[in-house]
Image (cartoon, grey):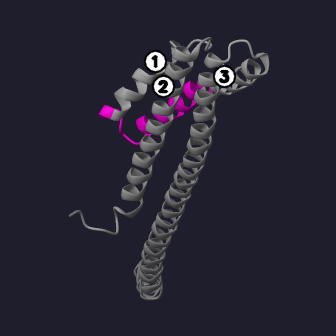
Amino acid sequence: MEVEVAKVIETISIDAIKILGPAIIAAFATYKATKTQYEIKLNEITKSHEFKAREHLFDYYKERQIKLSKSHEELKNVLCQLLGMSISASDYKGNNSIGKLVDSFAGASSLYSGLAPFEIETMLRDFESKGLSETREYAKLQSYTDKLKDIQKPEDYPSIKNNVFILLEVYSFLERCNQMLLEAQIENLFSNYVSKV
């Protein structure tokens, strides 16, 4: 009887292997194919989101460049008017209304000189995030931080003139540095799609 039980078990085992073997192989093949498709789709989604993120960052730098250019133009106008008024004020020392006008323009230059360190710190941080901290521009930006600390409240024409030229130089350089960031972002955005020349 034991021999017959062994034959029945052997027959059942062979039948089970015939039935389950292909099913196990098919299930394993389906698992591998599904896993591969999942990884491909995940990689595709990751690349798509990475490109969109870089594109948004590019748009941010582009908009910042436009704002910096516009602010630089406005600053230039205000500071040039300040220079003109301060020359007039030095010629007409007795005229109190011109002096008040010069003081109001001098206040505008103080406002810009107060904002400039923040703009420089933001730019330095962006340079570091883009790996541009070893450039000459980065070092020059750092030197402007010290230069801005030396700006005093303008009292006479030479100090007003000095402040105006420092601010014009700083904001022009900030505009140039943002252009570098924009170019670095463009290169980063399209590096996967364009071969290096």
Q: Which residue is mark 2?
A: 166
Residue 63 counted in the magenta span: no
Residue 160 spot, x, y in % from top left: 57, 19
- Tell me whether the residue at label 1 lies in contact with that at label 2, contact meaning CB atoms closer than 8 angstroms: yes
**Rendered location of residue 182, percent (x, y):** 44, 52
**Residue beneath the point at 47% across and 70% down:** 44
- Of the 4 image quadrants, the one containing the C terminus is bottom left
Q: Residue furthest left?
A: 197
Q: Nearer the viewer, residue 128 or 103?
A: 103
Q: In the picture provided, is 76 more to the left or to the right than 7?
A: right
Tell me the CA gap for discs 3 and 2.
Answer: 14 Å
For label 1, the residue is: 147
* Disc nearer the start of the sequence (1/2): 1
- Image vertical order of residue 30 relative to residue 111, above or below: below
Toward the viewer: 43 or 89? 89
Disc on the earlier residue, 1 or 3:
3
Magenta-drawn segment: 113-136
